[in-house]
Amino acid sequence: MACVGDLQFPRTPAPVPPEKRNGATVKRDAVAPQGLYRPRYRRTPAMRSPDYVQLSTAAAITLGLIPGRMHRCACTHCLNLLLTYPEGCRANCAYCGLARHREANTNYADRNFIRADWPAAPLDEIVARIADAGPATPFQRMCISMITHPASDADALTVLERWTSRIPRGDIPVSILSNPTTMTRADVARMLDLGADIFTVALDACTPEIFERTRGKGVDSPHSWGGYWRAFEHARELFGPGRVGMHLIVGLGETDRDVLDICRRLHAVGGHSHLFCFYPERGSLMDHVPAPPRARWRRVQLARYLLEYADHPFEAFAFSAGGELLDFGMAAERLDAIVASGLPFRTSGCPGKERPDLSACDRPYGDGPPSDIASYPFQPNGNDLRRIRAQLARRP
Ligand code: SF4
């Protein structure tokens, strides 16, 4: 079993044959896209943003584009739109299903990402469906997910513009899941001008060393720790408090203290952390690495909630010499009431319309299976809370 702070090394990918690089297969076949595309149902069409975008399976079901039901969820409340190109993402992050090394075997639009398929559809059709639904839509937020591609900055702006020209800004606010490696401060400012509500940076790795190993030179990927923090700084200055977020993954080899120290830094400047429990993605360079023990994950989830939403100081936490969280430093009665609310164990992300500490981006089963839920996409019931309490009581 993985312990706090264990090194989690990516495997080395096989080289990609030249005839498969940069979306060559899709470009050679040159199949024209026609409406909805479901991964691996037919030959991959040559789809490009901004005219085409991919969307999560949960969003496609909620929008009525594909049939399906989600365990214990009526719908998702966030419409995640992912930019798409035959060349795909040119980065190579070790835990990601979209990484460049996968072009050896899988076309970009057919890759699993966050353990789900991402169907593709014309952007105008998606926007029209949302506009036609009006107040009846279940979506409380839309998110444009950029990737590392030369056209991604300009196309994200076009997607945003096409959306805000039809959907009133207050109806369904827009988040940007940015690509800091290619974006300038001017790009961030333009996002704000065009009506983006929240700007997020997916730092993912909680230390510079883990970042380098999983998303930088260690895996022949272009990202840098400094570049990600620079983009966050631009967004913090331009968007202001409460409108910047950062994705962090628990289980890449960091300690509890590493994660919570970043949560503390974010909270101090008006930012929010969006926590993900590492969950190995099939076909990624870390698909052999186990998820962190639930006991550890629950404690970090709870501590993050205390920092950001319960005015609890970081200094109250007690850590071991190795960075393991030992004690929350809160009176048992108060801590118990917060656990009983279930809120710390819900999926974290940009807020919806119900309350500031409840995310619209519920990502059903994005970081754990329905049989062993890591982030609850719904309010945990009595049985769920009993299970959560038992996990919290275990030593990681
Ligand atoms: S930049 Fe994002 S989409 Fe691209 S490989 Fe890295 S995590 Fe995946």
Image: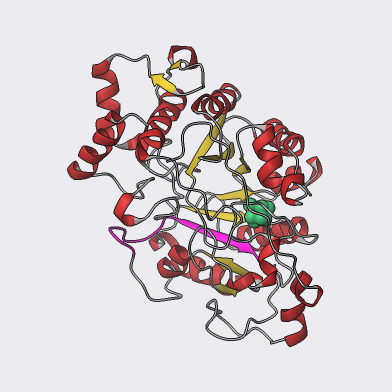
Q: Which residues are magenta?
A: 70-83
Q: Position of residue 294 (x, y in %)?
A: 36, 40
Residue 342 or 1: which is nearer the viewer?
1
Total numbered labels? 0
Residue 281 in sight here: yes
Left or right of 380, for residue 52: right
Q: Is residue 74 magenta?
A: yes
Q: Position of residue 36 (x, y in %)?
A: 55, 79
What colouring method underlies this structural image? secondary structure
Residue 146 in sight here: no
Q: Is residue 57 magenta?
A: no
Against 313, residue 260 (above or below) is below
Q: Position of residue 138 (x, y in %)?
A: 39, 59
Against 140, residue 43 (above or below) is below
Against 188, residue 324 (above or below) is above
User: Quadrant location of residue 90?
Assistant: bottom right
The residue lying at 70 percent from left, 79 percent from top is: 46
The residue lying at 50 percent from left, 63 percent from top is: 56
Left or right of 361, for residue 261: right
The residue lying at 77 percent from left, 58 percent from top is: 154
Query: Which quarter of the rendering shows the C terminus?
Result: top left
Quadrant of the image where one finds ligand 1: bottom right
Query: Which quarter of the rendering shows the N terminus?
Result: top left
Q: Position of residue 328 (x, y in %)?
A: 38, 19
The residue lying at 47 percent from left, 70 percent from top is: 132
